[in-house]
Amino acid sequence: MLLPSPEPPPRPNDEVMDDRQLLRYSRHLLLDEIGIDAQERLLGGTALIIGAGGLGCPAAMYLAAAGLGKILIADADTVDLTNLQRQILHRESGIGMPKVESARRTLAEINPQVEIIMLPQRLEGADLDAAVARSDVVLDCCDNFATRHAVNRACVRHRVPLVSGAAIRFDGQLAVFDPRQADSPCYHCLFPEGREVEEVRCAVMGVFAPLTGIIGTMQAAEALKIVGGFGTPMRGLLLLDSRTMEIQQIGLGKDPDCPVCSAAALA
């Protein structure tokens, strides 16, 4: 079920920024790689964020601040006191509130012209397909492999770029999978579904608060580049150890026999 936010203030012209928008986004407009054209692409763009937790919160804040026109946020949980150590969209006054509503309230204060679509559910099946199909980019900010694989399959089916992030303890990772590119791997190529993988969660293992901000902000940066059509989206897998701030990048290859994204699977 889609719960729309209150209608954002109307724009005088969907193709041309008004004076207030020119001022709001002026620091982007000063960058040759962005300028007016890319900023207008952002204003007309749509992102789907899976999870309004440690990663989804900073990602959503930067997407809204940067002027991404429409943000869909999917999360079935409510705000808990333990979330507030790292989930920076939420406030103590929002404890017990659906996370999507808490997120909408904060994002409306950051940029009221961004349309927030609340999805207070764990997206799956036809609902997941519909949400992915209407998006220009998907940010996987969830904390379980079943959802990650379902989101990956939907992104491959609809050829929508996927920006995947994870953070646990002091370790973070980031990857971009772009099914529009023939040689791009998918999430299944990296973590095959069905393989025995230990699933660890913050509630059990803990997580360093700023780490979620770092990875979530990186996800926002990659999503903005994809929607705005500037820069070069990252390739491979980025690993961050926040205890030492050491970063490793590992190349990723497409699995020619992948049951999700191989030519045979898509035929």
Image (tube, rainbow, N blue to C red):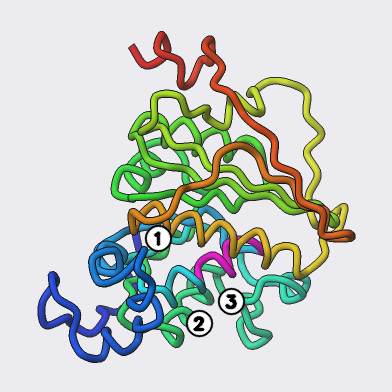
Mark drawn on residue 142: none
Closer to the N terminus: mark 2 or mark 3? 3
- Determine whether label 2 and label 1 are within 8 Å by CB: no
Report if residue 7 lies within the magenta region. no
Mark drawn on residue 89: 3
The percent coordinates of residue 146 (x first, y second) are 61, 35
Is residue 133 toward the left or the right of residue 224 in the image?
A: left
Residue drawn at x 68%, y 85% is: 92
- Determine whether label 2 and label 3 are within 8 Å by CB: yes
The percent coordinates of residue 158 (x first, y second) are 33, 34
Name the amino acid type tagged 1.
Leu
Q: Could you tell me what secondary structure mostly forms the magenta stretch?
A: helix
For the residues marked 2 and 1, what is the alpha-carbon distance in whole angstroms? 14 Å
Residue designated by label 1: 72
Extent of the magenta region = 54-60
Is residue 235 toward the left or the right of residue 18 in the image?
A: right
Q: Nearer the viewer, residue 93 or 114?
A: 114
Residue drawn at x 64%, y 28% is: 190
Name the amino acid type tagged 3.
Leu
The percent coordinates of residue 70 (x first, y second) are 33, 65
Closer to the N terminus: mark 3 or mark 1? 1
Residue density around tag 2, few if under 14, some if 14–19, many if 20 or more, within 10 Å = some
Q: Nearer the viewer, residue 93 or 202?
A: 202
Residue drawn at x 25%, y 78% is: 7
How many numbered discs, if any? 3
Mark drawn on residue 106: 2
